[in-house]
Amino acid sequence: MEMKNRAQFIDMLKGLALLVMIEVHVVNIFISGEIKSAWWFSYLNFINGLVAPAFTFSSGMVFVLSLQKGLDELRKFGMKFWKKLGRLMLVFLAGYSIHMSFLSLRKLSNPEYPHMLQEFLKVDILQCIAVGLIILLMLRILIINDKGFYITVLLLDLFVLAFGPYAWGTDFSNTIPLGIANYFNRIHGSLFPLFPWLSFILTGALIGKLYIEARIGIGEKKFSKYLIIYGTALFIGSYLLLDFILPSSVVEIKPNPIFFLQRLGVLLLLLGIFWYYINRFENYSSFIMDVSRESLLVYWLHLKILYKKFWDGKNIIDFFGTELGILEVAVITIILAIIMVFLAKGWGYLKIKYPVLISRGVLIIVSVCVIIFFIA
């Protein structure tokens, strides 16, 4: 049973993160300011704040698992390499498309409306994940020795955490193009710059390595028990440091490495719990897995539904307003989540039923959109 359900607990973390992400965006958009000031809302914010770490962390973990076979073929830079890189580039392009006002670089670059280009160049979680996984892919190809690869990932991980506070305090757009500078910090509106979010991806890769070793060593059950123990210890220790022990001058450092450790502790704890839960079943299946497998579609489409101006220059936000109550927000969240689940199931079915047709269709559509973007 251990081998059969070898990665489903990771898929559960990723799938749940996506579903909660829908709630996060709906709440951030629609809920009234009065409710946001309620005493309990800070607890909801903490839970919602785990979504992005879970999404990035699980992406790094799953990616490393996917690189366990066929490395020699990848290193030949043949079809397998280009297919994997192509998937990552699709994620990369999808991230930028979320912030598009027009499918045209010329229109976005209109000097009369500079905010459009600035909005387009912001780094979202999809660009962060794509760049992080491309870094992992290239390192895995270039560094043949396993130990050397994971030591490099660890050192890069520590560098990102250590360099993060400096990166956040420096406006790199003074010396490099804004589109690249946005990957370093949030000064110009990026929500998920590489510092510190790349650390969640890299740490996911490192935990993935430990999981691979555990499967042939101590076993998944013992590994999951360690996840729960160390995750709990990390969370409690980080909480005590941030809230009771460290001076405010240290706590206020942004981004704070201890903030990272606190979130990592929760993620490890959840992973361990999910493993025990899934292994209670002989053949576990859930809509959560469908959402996880079609994460790009779910993430991209639910944001387009929320923000895209469909009717006379208006979007859903314009119709419902931004001062809704708890019940209204809950209804919108549930309806949107149900739509995403059914679309994920349907798209997954089509990919299995017509894999070649769907793959070529997506390639053609994306290629046409890229061409239009540069020539329109």
Image: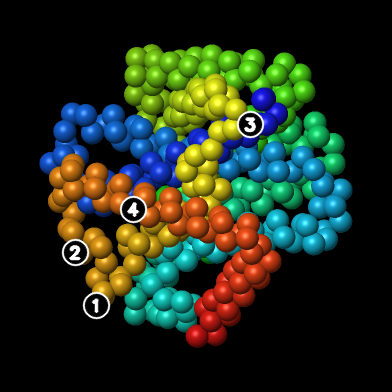
Query: What numbered label is drawn on residue 5?
Result: 3
Q: Is residue 360 visible?
A: yes
Q: CA distance from mark 4 to mark 1?
A: 22 Å
Q: Position of residue 326 (x, y in %)?
A: 18, 42
Q: CA distance from mark 3 to mark 2?
A: 44 Å
Crowdedness of circle 3 by 10 Å Cα count: few (<14), some, many (20+)?
some
Q: Are marks 3 and 4 in contact (CB under 8 Å)?
A: no
Q: Which residue is mark 4?
A: 336
Task: Place residue 149 in its image quadrant.
Answer: top right
Foreground label between 4 and 1: 4
Q: CA distance from mark 1 to mark 3?
A: 48 Å
Q: CA distance from mark 3 to mark 4?
A: 29 Å
Mark 3 or mark 4: which comes first in sequence? 3
Q: Amino acid at mark 4?
A: Leu
Residue name at image x 50 percent, y 85 percent: 376
Q: Is residue 200 visible?
A: no
Mark 2 or mark 4: which comes first in sequence? 2
Q: Is residue 356 left or right of residue 113?
A: right
Residue name at image x 55 percent, y 85 percent: 375
Q: Which residue is mark 2?
A: 319
Crowdedness of circle 4 by 10 Å Cα count: few (<14), some, many (20+)?
some
